[in-house]
């Protein structure tokens, strides 16, 4: 059985790409629950996401160069995953115009007006 969702496939693709990027940058919830204001109830290593480790390196340990390199690595990982998603979108996302929907379609030249006619 094949299910198609042609009219909302573009919106679904946008949501998938944005949520994938947001998942790699999750910070607020875990930092608040495990690392905020003297929380010693939980083991802090349980929620040590990449972005939280990056934040600790930059602002707790003041290793700005290392944190900057980590941010560039995070950017490269997100870029590669987004490019892979864009590659797969060619097969999964429906565009109404078919193969020519993303290409420029040449416009026929209008005939030049005769002398003495208003345009």
Image: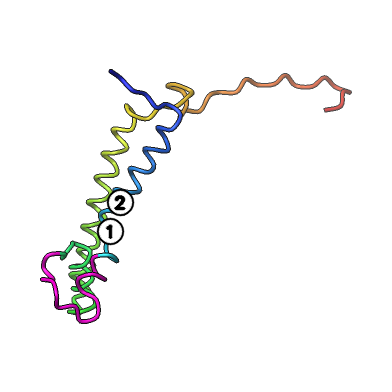
Q: In this view, does 17 lie to the left or right of 44?
A: right
Please tell me which residue lies in front, 31 or 92: 31
Are dots 2 and 1 in contact, CB under 8 Å? Answer: yes
Residue indicated by mark 2: 21
Q: In this view, does 62 lie to the left or right of 94?
A: left
| 24 lies above or below 6 | below
Q: How many other residues sit within 10 Å of disc 1, few (<14), some (14-19) or many (≥20)?
A: some
Q: Residue furthest bottom?
A: 38
Residue occupying the point 46% across, 29% down = 7
What residue span does the magenta drawing correspond to? 30-46
Determine whether the residue tagged by mark 2 lies in a helix, strand or loop.
helix
How is the model colour-coded? Answer: rainbow
Give percent across and percent down for residue 10.
Answer: 42, 35
The quarter of the rendered structure image containing the C terminus is top right
Q: Is residue 102 left or right of residue 30?
A: right
The quarter of the rendered structure image containing the N terminus is top left
- The circle on residue 8 is none
Determine whether the residue tagged by mark 1 lies in a helix, strand or loop.
loop
| Residue 94 image-quadrant placement | top left
| 103 lies above or below 43 | above
Residue occupying the point 20% across, 63% down = 70
Give percent across and percent down for residue 51.
Answer: 22, 63
Give percent across and percent down for residue 28.
Answer: 29, 66
Q: How many other residues sit within 10 Å of disc 2, few (<14), some (14-19) or many (≥20)?
A: some
Give percent across and percent down for residue 60.
Answer: 20, 79
Residue indicated by mark 1: 25
The Cα atoms of the two marked residues, 2 and 1, are separated by 7 Å
Residue 34: say if magenta.
yes
């Amino acid at each position: 059985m094949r299910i198609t969702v042609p009219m909302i496939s573009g919106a679904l693709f946008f949501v998938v790409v944005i949520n994938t990027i947001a998942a790699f940058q999750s910070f607020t919830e875990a930092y608040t629950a495990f690392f905020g204001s003297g929380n010693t109830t939980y083991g802090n290593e349980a929620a040590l996401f990449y972005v939280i480790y990056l934040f600790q390196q930059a602002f707790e340990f003041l290793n700005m160069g290392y944190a900057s390199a980590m941010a560039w690595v995070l950017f490269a990982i997100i870029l590669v995953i987004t490019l892979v998603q864009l590659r797969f979108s060619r097969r999964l996302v429906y565009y109404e115009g078919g193969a020519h929907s993303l290409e420029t379609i040449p416009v026929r030249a209008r005939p030049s007006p005769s002398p003495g006619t208003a345009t």
